[in-house]
Image (cartoon, rainbow, N blue to C red):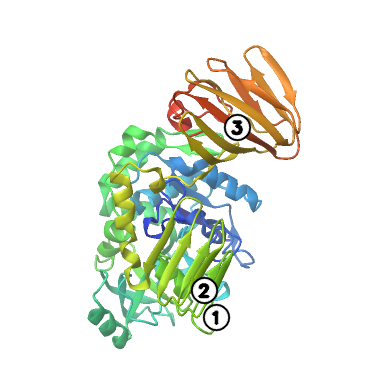
Amino acid sequence: MNTLIPIILSGGSGTRLWPLSREKHPKQLLSLINEDSLLQATVTRLDGLKGIKINAPIIVCNEEYRFVIAEQLRLIDRKGTIILEPVGRNTAPALTLAALAASAVDNDPVLLVMPSDHIIMDVATFQATILKGMSLALNGHIITFGITPDAPETGYGYIQIGDTLAQTETAHHIARFVEKPDLSTAQAYLDAGNYLWNSGFFMMRASVWLVAISKCSPDIFTACLAAWEQGSRDGEFVRVNKNSFEQCPSDSIDYAVMERISDSGSELPDGVVFPLTVKWSDIGAWNSLWQALPKDNEGNVTKGDVLLSHCKNTLAISDSRLVTCVGTEDLIVVETSDAILVVNKDKTQDVKSIVDALKRQGRPESQWHRKVFRPWGWYDSIDFGERFQVKRIVVKPGAALSLQMHYHRAEHWVVVRGTARVTCNDAIYLVTENESTFIPFGTKHRLENPGCVPLEIIEIQSGSYLEEDDIVRFDDVYGRKTIDLLSE
């Protein structure tokens, strides 16, 4: 049976979906449509597809996201190869690394490339189109999937389709790729009827991609091959060589290969496009999410603890407390524990300017949520002031924080659920519910959860300096370097 490996590209930050999406917790990790995150929905998108052997996915991601992505796979009981990019270099190098990884575990499988942050509402139609594309991919074609447009969208690139491919009914030669148009041009594309939205979905054999990238963009292929061959496996993660990968040019799949093979002649694989008639969105901005979600009779969409009165075409999201809107129209209102966004639906592309301003001011809201996920669990900074900070910390069963010491702060831990095993200098002891322990500054210490239920504690920090760089690391069970641990 033919083998298909999903390749999931998970490198974006989604700054236009701030404040839910943050640099350290991007939009693909958010549950925007249902209980699953966008990443989890991408991983399960091929469930139930018959006639094809589907291997575990290969996920290419930023090194900073590795633990939360591994945790999201665990929550849906899935496994996969997670390739860590030490620096971002766009989608063509990411796919090249994935193709090298796929070639190492299978005999030239077909790769289905999917961004991790897109939504597809009609999964059955998507799967049927993938089945149609499989035979062409096996025969050496590089396939892209274009979304049949239903509006003059200016936020997407377009693909102009050419003649129908011989012996097929729905596949077309690619006439050209075009950039995001203005409104009048987008309307002209819609009226012409031979333009599709560029979805970012691709399909090809691993060997076909490697040949294409080596001929079209040899600098990318050479750098990725060196980074792969000099890489190493770190538990469930694959680390490529940083020095080699940093030499790799940054380029997209479209620019590096697809635009060059559409009129290249016989020396390169043929590029073809399949129309995909499904409800799809890349959720590039809040307005896109409003369009994708079901609405009430007044065009409103709500998520979380929200009350509306006399509102129209409003998207209101509550993450941590009650949000109320009265008489709003064409507004986006998004609440989190540390930030609130109010923006007109026509200006949602400009949210990035707010994120840029936060970065210039050095504010943490551009990067972190108040609740921060770690491989051992998570913490929430409940309160802080001069000389004190209070955190709620939850440690997963069997997990442990690093062995560490602080020069300028002491910590008082109160266990509210579960049992903690505490290392304090040479002493190791248990602290159970409704008990507490004190960690003086200058003390080597570690917090562990030896039980089978989550450990929940309240940590009160006090001292003259409470920043996270006041940490000396001695040991970490996750093999993280000091730079990875600054926000633990």
Which element is circle 2 on? strand
- Name the amino acid type tagged 2: Val
Q: Is there CB contact under 8 Å for labels 2 and 1? A: yes
Q: Residue furthest bottom?
A: 191
Residue underneath mark 3: 459
Amino acid type, callout 3: Glu
Q: Which residue is mark 1?
A: 296
Q: CA distance from mark 2 to mark 1?
A: 7 Å
What residue sits right under mark 2 in the picture? 301
Q: Is residue 224 visible?
A: yes
Image x and y of residue 117, in percent: 46, 60
**Along the line of sight, the residue nearer the viewer: 476 or 466:** 466
Q: Is residue 481 above or below residue 286?
A: above
Q: Quadrant of the N terminus?
A: bottom right
Q: Earlier in the sequence, mark 2 or mark 3?
A: 2
Asked if 14 appears above or below 167 in the picture, the reply is above
